[in-house]
Structure formats: C-alpha cells, structure tokens
Amino acid sequence: MTQVLGVTVAGLSHPGRKRQSNQDFFLINRSLNLFAVSDGVEGGPYGEVASRMAGEKLEALLKDFDLSADATPPSADRPGMPFPVRALKYAFREVNRQLFVYTQENPKFKGMGTTLTALWFFEGRAYVGHVGDSRGYLIRDKVAKQLTMDHTSISESPMKQMQDIKLYEEISHTSEHELTRAMGINPDVQVQLAGGAPRPGDHFLLCTDGLYGQVQDWEIAKAASAEPPQLACRKLIQLANSRGGSDNIAVVIIQVE
C-alpha cells in the first residue's frame, strides 16, 4: 500500500459538558492511512460499545483485505466503480452486518447502533465512506466543504437527495438528530462514498455532531487552516464546550503537505 507523504494527523474526543459518558470514538491508523469517527446512536443502548466496535472492525477488515483488483468484491450497481471504492463499500457493509449479527446473538445489545465516517488514503487518492450524521469535511483554500450528507430526515428530503458517489461538492449544512441510517440497526445499509485527489495544503476533518452542532463551518475551516492539527482539535473542542458542550465530541484533522 502506498503511503501518503507529508501528512500530519491528530484526533481528540471529549464527553462535553452535559453528558457523563462518552459514546464518541475516533480512529487513527497511520500504517493504513485510515481515519474515522463514530457516534453511538442517541437513545439507543450501549452506544459507546457500538461506536468502538464499528471503528475497530473497519480497521481490522481493511488491514486483512486483499486489495488487488481481482480480489476486490464487484459492485453490481456500479460495475465501473474503482476497486478501492468497492473495498471501502464492502468493508462498511460487512461492519454493519457484523454489528447487526452481534446484537441478534446478544439480546442485551439489541437496538444499539452508531454512525461511522471514515477517510482512507490509498495510492495517492482520498476515499470517504459514510453512514449517519457524523461529518467529513475538505478544507481547501480556507473554505470548508462538506463531503458527507447527514443521513437525517430533513437532509434526505426529496430536494436534497444525492448520488452514492460524489466528488468534493458542498451540500446542505442542515441537520436533525432523527437518523435515517445507522450502522448495526438493520441487516444491510446504504453507504455514501466520496473520492478525489488531495492537494498540498488540504485539510480533511472528521467530526461528530457534538462539534458541528455548536461550531460553524467557517470556524472549523479557520481553526484547521491556522493551527497544527493537535492544537486545532483542542481549540475546536474548547469552542464547542464554551457554547454549552451539550453532546459528546470527537474530531480528527488530517493535514496534507
């Protein structure tokens, strides 16, 4: 696997000011160039278990996956889909399946679910997989562009539907917490995918709704552009908490040099 040179990454999570537990999880795996955030479904049981399991299972699947073109599962709906995209889509659906089976075999966990948003660098390109209302951003030229769609009732109204594969395009910033998709709730799940070629100076930011619910996109772009990733993560969480900190927060920032 080709490594992406000149990448600096940091992640941070905080329970916020209103919650006793933290159901948010973040993943940084530099050997895979895989980064993710996940957020246990609010109101469901064992959200902290679901979010951690989703991130760790995604990591394990991509670590052990045969990424040769011939071995990557085909996609019947999009035969021309690049094989890294097929691999990411397969991994997300398999994580979902494993979580669902786990809840069926362990009744006390029934109903638990989580969001999952992941960024994967492979052979010089960036790929995003996404389910739920956590978010992935591309910050380019100090402007934040949302790469993911919030899988909520308001965002998936007929006026705001989009294709599963989308290049970097700004979409709705509106979110409500009534999820229409989550990992582990149903036997299968529709995965949103995005991809493109990163440029020097780009920043990618993954976060849960505890951040963007309190902090505007322009503030996210300003912090990520002006500070090293570790300091930017800290400042953004401090800002969210200063405005109430009503939810758990997780954020990962990846700087491409």
Image: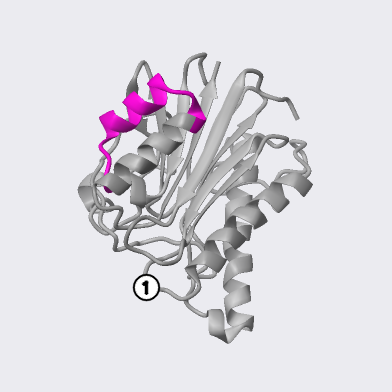
Q: Nearer the viewer, residue 49 or 146?
A: 49
Predominant secondary structure in magenta? helix
Q: Nearer the viewer, residue 74 or 189?
A: 189
Q: Residue at x 67, y 49 (%)?
A: 59
Left or right position of 48 against 144: right
Check if residue 166 falls in the magenta segment.
no
Q: Residue at x 48, y 15 (%)?
A: 201
Q: Quadrant of the N terminus?
A: top right
Secondary structure beneath dot 1 equals loop
Left or right position of 69 against 19: right
* Number of residue marks: 1
| 142 to 25, vertically: above or below | above
Q: Nearer the viewer, residue 128 or 28?
A: 28
Q: Could you say where residue 130 lies in the image, as x and y percent from the top left? A: 47, 47
Bounds of the magenta segment: 213-230
Q: Could you say where residue 165 lies in the image, as x and y percent from the top left? A: 46, 38
Check if residue 221 falls in the magenta segment.
yes
| 142 to 111, vertically: above or below | above
Q: Is residue 165 visible?
A: no
Left or right position of 8 against 215: right
Q: Could you say where residue 252 lies in the image, as x and y percent from the top left? A: 50, 39
Q: Could you say where residue 8 lies in the image, as x and y percent from the top left? A: 58, 25
Q: Residue at x 48, y 49 (%)?
A: 13
Q: Is residue 204 visible?
A: yes
Q: Label 1 belongs to which residue?
A: 43
Q: Quadrant of residue 50?
A: bottom right
Left or right position of 170 against 70: left
Q: Nearer the viewer, residue 204 or 223?
A: 223
Q: Amino acid at mark 1?
A: Gly
